[in-house]
Image (spheres, coloured by chain):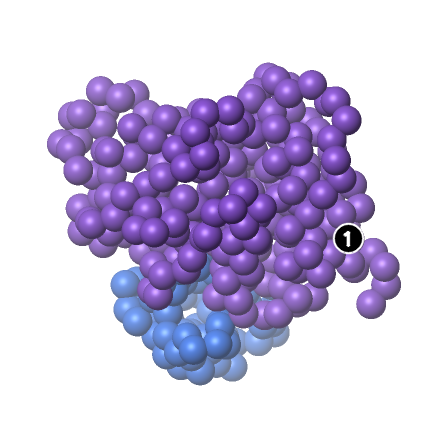
Chain colours: A blue, B purple
Amino acid sequence: MEVTLPFLAEGVDEATVSYWKVDEGDRVEEGDDLVEMFTSKAVFSVPSPAAGVVEEILVREGEVVKVGQTLCTLKED
Amino acid sequence: MSSRERELAVRVLGLRDYEEAYLLQKELVEARIRQAIPDTLLLVEHPPVFTLGRGVQGEQFRVPASQVEALEVKVIPVDRGGQVTYHGPGQLVGYPIFDLARHRQDLHWMLWSLEEVLIRFLKDFGIRGERRKSYPGVWVGREKIAAVGIGVRRWVTYHGFALNVNPDLSYFRFIYPCGIHDCGVTSLAEILGEGIEISRALLEKIAFYTGEVFQLEVASFQNDAEVSGVAQEKAQEQPPC
């Protein structure tokens, strides 16, 4: 499954990747933090929507990502 | 919603190290995610410290690194939005551990609301606090009186606001507050003159406006302060807010 950047705030359509908390191949549980990101005013972590294994990380640290864009793919259990 | 979901617990910590208060926030965020605690507002003062938000770009300090080191003030990178700021005694720091799933799942609405709390609070002192487009925080004229910046995990917030009540403003001369090169910093004491401090009445006023803006009832007001400016004021009768 694809993990995408969720809605963050009215009028905000992008955020920057600060750092990944997981690597490709890591096992994660539902709710585990995958990546920390920030907007001009706030920092947030994107949690894993399901338990599984991180397959492919698609955005790099420092990259600006649009809401709805895929951050990584996850192979669900 | 049950009545519990409209509750606000306020905890006054007094003077606490930045790192210690940060760890407490992280614990409370986890507890809030588990629904083990209601929305909670921590009110604290820190010993002098500079913190760097995730939005840092360009030069943050006005002086060479050696001068910052000579101050013996820690510089800590933290997971909040925004750029560099200073915390120190006389500055009231508020950390709301709020579940935005029960308010509005919008990070910038949260910041707007924190600014609103401070603007209503300042109005009680006859001070007109204002927002400036693309510069978070609360401003009085061209000077900044309060900074805001948050982090959020699973829609539970941490970090928050820093309101200059009567801090030593000279520390701000070492930094470009929030990365802005042409702005000054002010405090309640500077605007009102001497005699204002972080009293129980002031803390209760902040709690009251937090409840008002977020539509929460202040269900508890716990003072954990051991040694701090907030303990200086005797718990004499204060008018309810």
In depth, the one of A5 and B225 nearer the eye is B225
In depth, the one of B145 and B192 nearer the eye is B192
Residue at 76% across, 39% down: B240
Please determine whether, in this image, residue A59 is positioned above or below residue B138.
below
Quadrant of the frame with the N terminus of chain B: bottom right
Callout 1: helix, strand or loop?
Answer: strand
In depth, the one of B159 and A27 nearer the eye is B159
Question: Residue A7: percent from the left, percent from the top?
Answer: 50, 76
Which quadrant of the view contains residue B41? top right
In the drawing, does residue B205 fall left or right of residue B66?
Answer: right
In the drawing, does residue B100 fall left or right of residue B22?
Answer: right
* Residue placed furthest toward the front: B126
Question: Residue B141: percent from the left, percent from the top?
Answer: 34, 51
Question: Residue A17: percent from the left, percent from the top?
Answer: 35, 64
Quadrant of the frame with the C terminus of chain B: top right
Amino acid of disc 1: Glu
Please determine whether, in this image, residue A56 is positioned above or below residue B208.
below
- Disc 1 target residue: B217
Q: Residues within 10 Å of mark 1 (few under 14, many from 20)?
A: some
Residue at 63% across, 64% down: B100
Q: How many marks?
A: 1
Please determine whether, in this image, residue B108 is positioned above or below residue B162.
below
In the drawing, does residue B1 fall left or right of residue B78?
Answer: right
